[in-house]
Amino acid sequence: MTRRAVVFDRIATFIAGLCLLALGGCVIAWQQGVFGTGAAVRLMFAEDIESAWWSWALGAGGIVLVLLCARWIATHRWPPRVSRVALAAEHDGLTANAASVADAAANALQDQPGVVKARGSTTVDRGTPTVTLTVTVPARGLRAGAAVADRTAETVAAMLGVSVAVRTVLRVDAKRRHAVS
Amino acid sequence: MTTALSEPTQMAMVPRPAPAPVAAAAASRVAVVLALALAAVGGVGIREALVGLGWISGVAWTPPVVDVMNGLTPDGWMFAAGAILGLMGIALMVLAVLPRRTRGLPLSAATAVYLDRADIPKLADAAARDVPGVLDARSSASRRKVVVRCRVTGQTQELRQAVADVVSQEFADLQTPPRVVVRIRTESSS
């Protein structure tokens, strides 16, 4: 998800909440006789539903609503992937395949004795191209896993430069308690 | 094409640290439900249009609903309905502004290394089970506290301290280690 999509979700949710609060308040006020004492609901379009244009309007409105909602739901996909990133100034004009570097880093990590499994991904996180290495370590191997992750992250930085952010997320495999070398 | 990653130590440099991964915003979950609900309303509209135009057979749903709504007068149940709607509205407004929860706890490391928050109890369990005298351990974790429940044999007080020390040691590498609380249940040896 992009930041813009999250902001849109927040605004839409807030407006929906505001509408529900206003509707609930109006219903209570009406029931308590604050306004329109004893008056009945008169729907403005009650007469129109027999009109010839009603079905067309309803159909067109329905199609637009479904399309807009499909577009809205589609914004909740996985975060945008990064494939190529520009290298530092001394390599002017050159780009590197960050996804391949992330995969290679994961493969290198997987070969380490204190690592159960590893995978790498490249996304845009809060506006910055980011390599995320997700490393599963044994339950008693957190310190060793962090040390290995440090070394690998430094190598990734050496290959891609500091324009790409790097992080390692350590997961714990509860079934394996100690590293097997 | 594959890329190999050797470890050229002379090239190593400190990477730009990435922030901790965050969970999806609560508002985004609500938004998906809202979008699905609105899409369903749109689908009903399309269905009503097709029925109204005679392109499909069926009974229109709109006229009975409009009949019920039209002429509605104040009634006792509306107070409760209004209150429920209002509370739902307040809940949605709160969810809309809730910050996203971070999923990772930072470790004291040279680069940006995070421990997945969900794995805190697994670490505590494994550490506690390595203490001699502990038969089993089950942990639960909140944002700032880990509660380790152990079944043990032997001296309760000494084991409590030993488990607390080992588990605290396990979390020593976290930048903000959680508070460790140990609850002991002694098993009678048969």
Image (spheres, coloured by chain):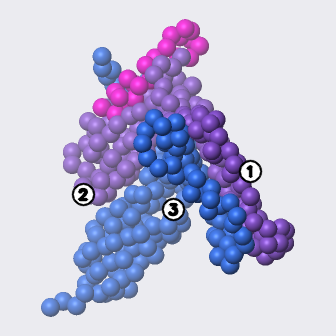
Chain colours: A purple, B blue
* Dot 1 amino acid type: Met
Instruction: Quickly name the residue at label 3.
Output: B177
Q: Nearer the viewer, residue B163 or A79?
A: A79
Q: Are marks 3 and 1 on the same chain?
A: no
On the image, the x and y values in percent for residue B105 come to 50, 53
Q: Which residues are magenta?
A: A87-107
Q: Nearer the viewer, mark 3 or mark 2?
A: 2
* Rendered-image quadrant of the N terminus of chain B: top left
Label 2 SS:
loop
State whether residue A141 is above or below residue A67. below
Residue at image position (74%, 51%) is A44
* Dot 3 amino acid type: Pro
State whether residue B38 is above or below residue A119. below
Task: Return the chain for callout 3.
Answer: B
Numbered circle sitting on residue A32: none
Instruction: Quickly name the residue at label 2.
Output: A175
Numbered circle sitting on residue A44: 1
